[in-house]
Amino acid sequence: MLDINRLRAEFPLLSRRVNGQRLIYLDNAATAQKPRAVIDAVNRYYRQQNANVHRGSHQLSNDATGLFEQARQSVARFINAPDSRELIWTRGTTEAINLVAQSYGRTMLRPGDEILLTTLEHHANIVPWQLLAQQTGAVIRVAGVHPDGGLDCDQFYDLLNARTKLVALTHASNALGTINPVKALTTAAKAVGAVVLIDGAQSTPHLSVDVQAIGCDFYAFSGHKVFGPTGIGALWGRRALLDAMPPWQAGGEMIERVSFSGTTFNRLPFKFEAGTPNIAGAIGLAAALEWLMAQDRAALEAHEASLLQHTLNCCSAIKGFQPIGTAANKVSLVSFVLAGQANQDVGLLLDQQGIAIRTGHHCAMPLMEQLGLGGTLRASFAFYNTHDEIELFAQALEQISRSEPHPVAASISSEQDPFDALPHGRSLSHESVSESLLGLRDWNSRYRQIMLLGRDLPALPESLKTEQHRLHGCESQAWLLHRQNPDGSLAFIADADARIIRGLIAIVLAALNHKSAEQIRQFDIHAYFTALDLERHLSPSRGNGLRAIVERIQQLAQQH
């Protein structure tokens, strides 16, 4: 029987408290926590074994090289690669995909050749192929998804043809959790002569992977998602393909001999590993995988499946809860929306209770576009999560679902001049904002006050929520309009779909609205935020949204 308490004790960070609350970490698809075995292995390397690898003439270098190459063998064994020399160290899945695109793709693809992708792909498995298509004249084809988030396999098979030279698809979707039938898809692709790359970033933490059984040509994954360090990952490729591929990056270690008349490149795998590698990262990744392989993987998978089902059972009756992506075969991840609540607000309110989830488009914008969504909320699980944590998450979500959105100032009619239609009343000043926020001792109360400040922003009509007025850099949707008043000052109107962003906009406008361009340029906004103690408590996404608002206003001030 799986001893969850014993497993959790292996992960030191899980005992931490956040915002005064017990941490419930449900953002494992973004990065997983690290067991003590990984932390100790990295620490031991730097304390006792730190030296550069290969070509060293001293014992310390020999020791480090041995550990480094043993790590390669461990990672190869984890995915059942037939030869560890086919295992290339990379910074992660993204770099591995780029390596294949720029080394194999630029060498082998010709104008009119086709690259087949799916709508489920992460941006990292889309954009490198778009760049490759621009460079080579190849054409990208895309297989769509069903409404439940499952891949449209019939369309995938229909798109395969003699011109299909490369297929790149995810093993498991980071946004929906959908597991693709990669073995069957690979078999079909190989039947038309295509080379197949599998993005294994989301599958390796949850599934036992066998690249030989899948039959693919390349398999890429990241260390930090599979309980290892950040900045390390691996690409496995068939030796015949790797031998034929030119180096992607040049430098030390990837060469055998250099002269000004020419260079002879090193053998595999070193041909693709220019420069000093992430030695500690490789050792840490091997420690993670050795630890994972020592566990009962079937029991871990069964527990994660129970977490997924328990989440759906606990959340199904919550008002407005709508799961996105209900395909039958999924990793332990729930993507959802909560009707009537902005994703970013929900994420913030959960964070106040120590519950970490992810909000946004999850670097899967084409998928969100096909589903008709701007983004989702995502709770992603690992084997160290518990049913008790799921129940606390569902209770918090249910409480949020019952909260009514704060009423906002009257909406502006699309027929009105938005500036003339502004409601008359007391306008905020930065002094009054400071007084209202700094009088509150705890940050949960201050967050609520920030959202209350957004009530005074008038709601823009849909006709004004255009790309021209949209603020770039905000995780949520936000829009800003401006005009110059008769006295030369600048007036601003803004709106957003999230209460927290509306509140942040109100704070900014309290300081900068109806000021001259010179006053805006001279106003020390950093000191203002520091005095309010804002930036220290805002997540990077909300902080970026705050900066996006300020930068746009300052840009407009520069133009006047």
Image (cartoon, rainbow, N blue to C red):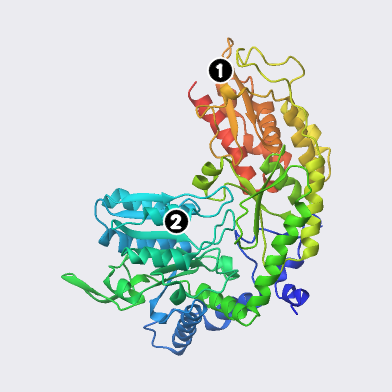
Determine the residue located farthest toward the top in the rendered image. 486
Q: Which quadrant of the structure image shows residue 82?
A: bottom left
Point 35% across, 70% down: residue: 272
Pointer 2 residue: 125
Image quarter where the N terminus lies is bottom right
Give the CA distance from mark 2 to mark 1.
Answer: 42 Å
Pointer 1 residue: 483
Q: Is residue 259 visible?
A: no
> Where in the figure is residue 118, as x and y percent of width and height?
45, 53
Point 45% across, 54% down: residue: 154
Point 69% across, 23% down: residue: 458
Residue 428, disc: none
Is 457 located above or below residue 204 in the figure? above
- Earlier residue among tags 2 and 1: 2
Label 1 sits on what residue type? Arg
Number of numbered callouts drawn? 2
Is 506 located above or below residue 159 in the figure? above
Label 2 sits on what residue type? Asn
In the image, 419: left or right of 115?
A: right
> Where in the figure is residue 292, as x and y percent of width and height?
61, 77
In the image, 246: left or right of 528?
A: left
Mark 1, other Cα within 10 Å: few <14 / some 14–19 / many ≥20: some
> Where in the figure is residue 120, as x and y percent of width and height?
50, 53
Mark 2, other Cα within 10 Å: few <14 / some 14–19 / many ≥20: many
